[in-house]
Image: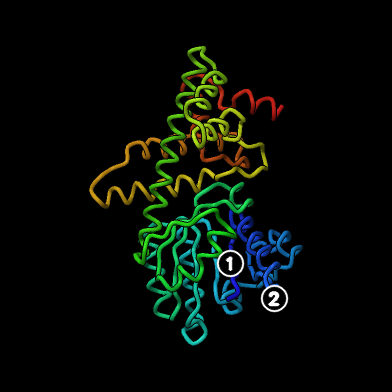
Amino acid sequence: MQPSLHDTGLGSMGLGMAINLQKHLSTSNPPGSLHFTNRTISRGGPLLEIGSVSCASASEVVLKSDITFISLSDDAAVESVITGICGLGSSKLKGKIIVDTTTIHPDTSFSVSQKLEEVGVQFVAAPASGASPLARSGELLFIVSGPDTATSTVAPFLKSVMGRDAKFLGEDIRKAGLMKTTGNFLTAAFMEVIAEAHVFAEKTGLGSNVLEALIEADYPGKPFTMSKRLTSGSYMPAAGERPMSDVTLAIKDISHGISCAEASGTSLPIAELAVAHLKESKAFVDKSDRIRALDSSSMYGILRVKAGLEFGNQAVKERDG
């Protein structure tokens, strides 16, 4: 089967995954070409350069492919694309597989899977965990649920082409989204705590450099990487630059977890706090610099402001002049 990617936006995540798919197809026997589409076709330039084929619409991509990967921004975008695809009818779609790497609400995954099932398409929920650098390097983690026949077919592309690993959670389509939003909650909680600790270190005179040395020594790995996103200024990218993980998408992802918690009769207070701080950060920067995108770690900026510091730390000041 020849996989293809549909992406309305070809953002940092989707483009990275698509490039890795095309590189894999180029080394296949016989070599193949990835078919893709995008609202702004020019975003697909890097794909065209390595042998991919541009299509005019998502429907055209699906018709040319047995497996279609989609990487979109949110639930509404996924629902819109799937509705359009379903309009092609079962005679043209039966037997195809669609893999959604977007982080969407578990209920949305169930809804679109039902629509696709009616026209003979198998749907796999496979939200990608990791920021854009991991998409480019092919080291994402995929959380997967869906029909066993479909997940086994797409597994080689998820585990050894676009990702470092994939966790398979069975046929309940909701489970992938539920696990992914749990991971988003953990990431947000870690980032909230590390951001608060850095503000504390700066205000008390301990110093962020001393705190970061402690984190590196006692909490290596992801906590240290998160700390570097703050101290390097990555939480507030330079004007015109894309963040590692967009704040708007982070708010959406964490909010899905809050919604799932409420529906099950519990709550995620730390997630609610993190979302509130991210929204405050976005609103604060939008007042003066509406074109600047913020990272999902940007709660650090508003925590600094609340403590009487400037939103941008020393690294941001030195970089932006």
Q: Whole-percent x and y of residue 174? A: 36, 61
Q: Whole-percent x and y of residue 273? A: 38, 35
Residue extending furthest toward the bottom: 91
Q: Secondary structure at mark 1?
A: strand
Residue 30 is tagged as 2
Along the line of sight, which residue is nearer the eye, 1 or 236? 1
Circle 1: residue type: His
Looking at the image, is 7 positioned above or below residue 257? Answer: below
Left or right of 195 in this view: 9: right
| Whether residue 65 is visible | yes
Along the line of sight, which residue is nearer the eye, 161 or 22? 161
Q: Disc 2 or disc 1, which is closer to the eye?
A: 2
Left or right of 112 in this view: 227: right
Left or right of 52 in this view: 159: left
Q: Whole-percent x and y of residue 119? A: 43, 81
Looking at the image, is 291 positioned above or below residue 172? Answer: above
Circle 1 residue? 6
Q: Whole-percent x and y of residue 262? A: 28, 48
- Quadrant in the picture for residue 64: bottom right
The figure's colour scheme reads rainbow
Circle 2: residue type: Pro
Looking at the image, is 244 positioned above or below residue 59? Answer: above
Residue extending furthest toward the top: 205
